Image (cartoon, grey):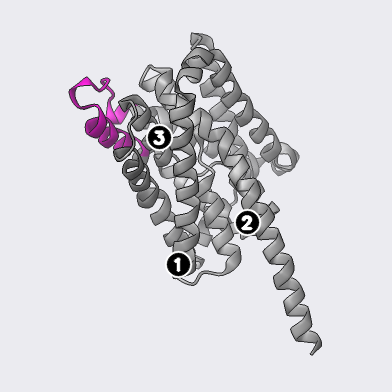
């Protein structure tokens, strides 16, 4: 990948996406962690534990190069994408829960992503793994995620008019930037992508479907409300692939690690779209049923 894209444009794009997330956050989004502990705890367990374990289980039984195995586990360790909030709204899910969980997992990613990455490198590459420092990786993630989120929240606090203007378009713009990052990654190294597409595509799709299925099943098992089930399903299905790509290219130094994230970044909107159609249809049926009950 061109060094300008990999070392400058990708980190800047990630920082902008996280800034857009921060502009839309308020202290209430963090207080909700304590007012809705059950749903957030379930979401945190799914994000921090279930997703990485699912990814490891999937690649353990599939014949794939070690770089792709590490790449898919790296993606699974990343927080939910900021587009999950917008798509949760479209699916008539619990948007407040989605925002709080995205904020929580994004701010803790400086700790969780490096740890899971080190485990994946040790499991699937052993002595052939690239030399990556735990602290260095965490610091880079901190600078590209936590700092921009903090700046965005500061804008919200001290310049609310600017924040409101930015927030009106930030989610759409971050979605556009995210799509541009994925497409730039695919195009810049199209030969590498073409050679890996089939095997990486199947792995990425397997993880995406499994993550959404497990999230919905677990949320149903613990009897969360349907709006919360919808939010957690989309939160687990829509990962911050931009962060995975930045870590793969910038820290691991090989675009091959980014292939699963780039492909996943496109596939996840297809599966999310199908889920949103189902969720909206369910919501419509439930609303009509409630009206009939009130009328009788």
- Identify the secondary structure beneath mark 1: helix
Tell me how far mark 1 sits from mark 2, CA to CA. 16 Å
* Residue at 44% from the left image edge and 63% from the top image edge: 218
Question: Taking 166 as reference, is 215 above or below it?
Answer: below
Residue interval drawn in magenta: 113-136
Separation of disc 3 and disc 1 at Cα?
28 Å
Disc nearest the viewer among 2 and 3:
3
**Residue 72: mark:** 3
* Image location of residue 25, percent across then percent down: 60, 48
Crowding at mark 1 (Cα within 10 Å: few <14, some 14-19, many 20+): few
x and y percentages locating residue 108 in the rendered image: 41, 44
Identify the residue at horizontal 78%, vertical 79% (top origin): 291
Does label 1 or label 2 sit earlier along the sequence? Answer: 1
Q: Which residue is mark 2?
A: 95
Of the image marks 2 and 3, the number of the one nearer the N terminus: 3
Q: Badge 2: how crowded within 10 Å, few (<14), some, or many (20+)?
A: many
Quarter holding the C terminus is bottom right
Q: Residue furthest right?
A: 295
Q: SS at mark 3?
A: helix
- Judging by the rendered image, the residue that carries numbered circle 1 is 38
Q: Earlier in the sequence, mark 3 or mark 1?
A: 1
Label 3 vs label 1, nearer the camera = 3
Q: Is 233 covered by the magenta stretch?
A: no
Q: Position of residue 239 (x, y in %)?
A: 51, 41
Which of the 4 image quadrants contains residue 92?
bottom right
- The prevailing secondary structure element of the residues shown in magenta is helix
Residue 130 vs 94, above or below: the answer is above
């Amino acid at each position: 990948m061109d060094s300008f894209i990999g070392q400058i444009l990708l980190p800047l794009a990630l920082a902008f996406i996280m800034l857009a997330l921060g502009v839309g956050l308020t202290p209430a989004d963090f207080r909700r962690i304590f007012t809705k502990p059950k749903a957030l705890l379930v979401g945190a367990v799914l994000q921090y534990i279930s997703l990485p374990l699912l990814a490891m289980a999937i690649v353990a039984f599939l014949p794939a190069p070690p770089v792709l195995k590490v790449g898919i586990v790296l993606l699974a360790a990343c927080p939910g994408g900021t587009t999950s909030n917008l798509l949760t709204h479209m699916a008539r899910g619990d948007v407040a829960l989605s925002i709080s969980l995205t904020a929580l997992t994004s701010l803790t990613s400086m700790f969780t992503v490096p740890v899971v990455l080190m485990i994946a490198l040790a499991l699937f590459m052993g002595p052939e793994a690239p030399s990556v420092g735990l602290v260095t990786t965490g610091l880079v993630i901190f600078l590209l995620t936590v700092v921009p989120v903090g700046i965005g929240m500061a804008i919200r606090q001290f310049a609310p008019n600017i924040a409101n203007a930015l927030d009106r378009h930030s989610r759409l713009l971050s979605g556009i930037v995210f799509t541009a990052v994925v497409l730039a990654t695919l195009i810049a190294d199209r030969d590498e992508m073409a050679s890996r597409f089939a095997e990486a595509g199947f792995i990425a799709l397997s993880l995406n479907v499994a993550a959404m299925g497990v999230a919905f099943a677990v949320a149903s098992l613990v009897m969360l409300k349907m709006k919360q089930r919808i939010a957690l399903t989309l939160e687990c299905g829509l990962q911050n692939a931009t962060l995975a790509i930045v870590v793969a290219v910038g820290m691991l130094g090989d675009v091959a690690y980014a292939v699963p994230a780039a492909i996943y970044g496109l596939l996840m909107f297809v599966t999310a779209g199908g889920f949103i159609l189902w969720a909206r249809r369910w919501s419509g049926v439930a609303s009509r049923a409630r009206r009939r009950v009130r009328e009788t």
